[in-house]
Amino acid sequence: MSWIRKKLDKVKEPFQPGEKFEKYAPAVNALDTFLFVPNHTTQKGAHVRDAVDLKRTMITVVLALIPALIFGIWNAGHQHFVQLGEEVGFLEAFLHGSYKIVPMIIVSYGVGLAIEFLFAILRGHEVNEGYLVTGLLIPMIMPVDIPLWMVALAVIFSVVIGKEAFGGTGMNILNPALTARAFAFFAYPTYMSGNKIWVSEASDVDGISGETILGALAEGKDVAYSSMDMFSGLIPGSISETSTLLILVGALILIMTKVGSWRIIVSGFIGAAVMGLIFNALNIEGNGLTNFPWYNHLIVGGLAFGIVFMATDPVSAAQTTRGKLIYGFLIGLLGVMIRVFNPAYPEGIMLAILLMNVFAPTIDYYVIQGNIKKRKKRLKLKTEKTA
């Protein structure tokens, strides 16, 4: 690797302080630090010495996303051929899915990183690595046939309005990937909802119905999939949100590496289960989603993917220990509540997470104030005993 190091050092010479292209140094340094560990250390002030930095944290999340992404690519092709009544092998289904999804990933990273580099140059700071995860999450939560220009616009809105407007990585109050999806959903609803968008090229072939399980239940139809199909992911849906099994594999990676909060994940699923049990007990006639078994609520739609990979975003989530439990529980609770009571939009995890992103600081505030009051009370009692 020494020859690469030498080449990069040579390339960086015109971008050094005082040189002609000093202004563009952040763009070159981003490539350098992506390939090599930074060659500088903190010289003064109190700081934590740790081998884990933001780049390694983001790469860990990307690795946790890979199993769901690979399955999502294959399932996109699989659902396409199943709807056509054709039996094909793994490779043919995977290639069809790759043909649809890889361009979305390229557009997401290309547009998003270009904006990140632009803002780094304009503001004179180094390029942040936060978009390594966001750039992959955005296409993974989109319908398979969404036009690439819509993906690009969603990315622009997410990065500029959802993140850079607040100061960049670490300052945003909303999850950037969900901000992109919310923009696409409300700006182009016909491309983000309905029965034809969840299966590749379904709109081009008569007789193909690519509706999701939640969409069918919202319309009072019967579900033709078993719980095992739902858990494994052999159902129509957003690109990488269908396989709860592989999402849980990703959750295990996040928890074992301590990158994702197990408190948010566990409490999120508990909150969803509680609301599912409440609706099962109410047993409201005419609403198939209320009679849908509570455990199936946990394994369909984007609930599992949202709780594991979106709700655990360390920037927009609650920060206190107890706050994380409350935050995750309310996301699961509201996610199921919205999907049941909103027949026009039977998937509610996106709105639930964005709503709780806004209230996360408030949750932390009251948790901290509660701890302060308890300590003051203990101090008062101790003072009275010693008096």
Image: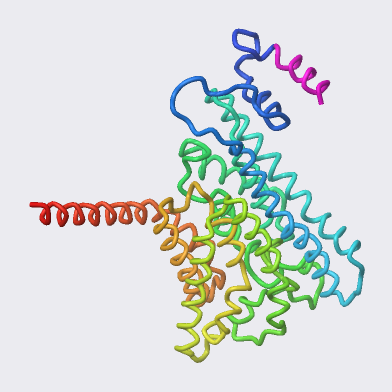
- Asked if residue 356 is positioned above or below residue 113 in the image, the reply reads below
Taking depth in this image into account, of 102 and 154 the one nearest to the observer is 102
Asked if the stretch drawn in magenta spans residue 3, the answer is yes
From which residue to which does the magenta span run?
A: 1-13
Q: Specify the farthest residue to the left.
A: 387
Spot occupied by residue 297 in the image (x, y as percentages of width and height): 58, 76
- Asked if residue 12 is positioned above or below residue 308 in the image, the reply reads above
Please state if 198 lies on the left or on the right of 99 as rendered: left
Q: Quadrant of residue 129?
A: top right
Spot occupied by residue 281 in the image (x, y as percentages of width and height): 46, 88
Spot occupied by residue 139 in the image (x, y as percentages of width and height): 68, 53
Q: How many marks?
A: 0
Asked if the stretch drawn in magenta spans residue 281, the answer is no
Q: Quadrant of residue 32?
A: top right
Taking depth in this image into account, of 183 and 384 the one nearest to the observer is 384
Q: Quadrant of residue 182?
A: bottom right
Residue shown at 36%/56% (left/top)?
363
Residue shown at 89%/65% (left/top)?
90
- Asked if residue 30 is positioned above or below residue 260 in the image, the reply reads above
Spot occupied by residue 290 in the image (x, y as percentages of width and height): 52, 84
Residue shown at 75%/73% (left/top)?
234
Name the image quarter holding the N terminus: top right
Taking depth in this image into account, of 381 and 267 the one nearest to the observer is 381
Please state if 101 lies on the left or on the right of 337 as rendered: right
What's the magenta bit mostly, secondary-structure-wise? helix
- Coloration of the structure image: rainbow
- Asked if residue 273 is positioned above or below residue 362 in the image, the reply reads below
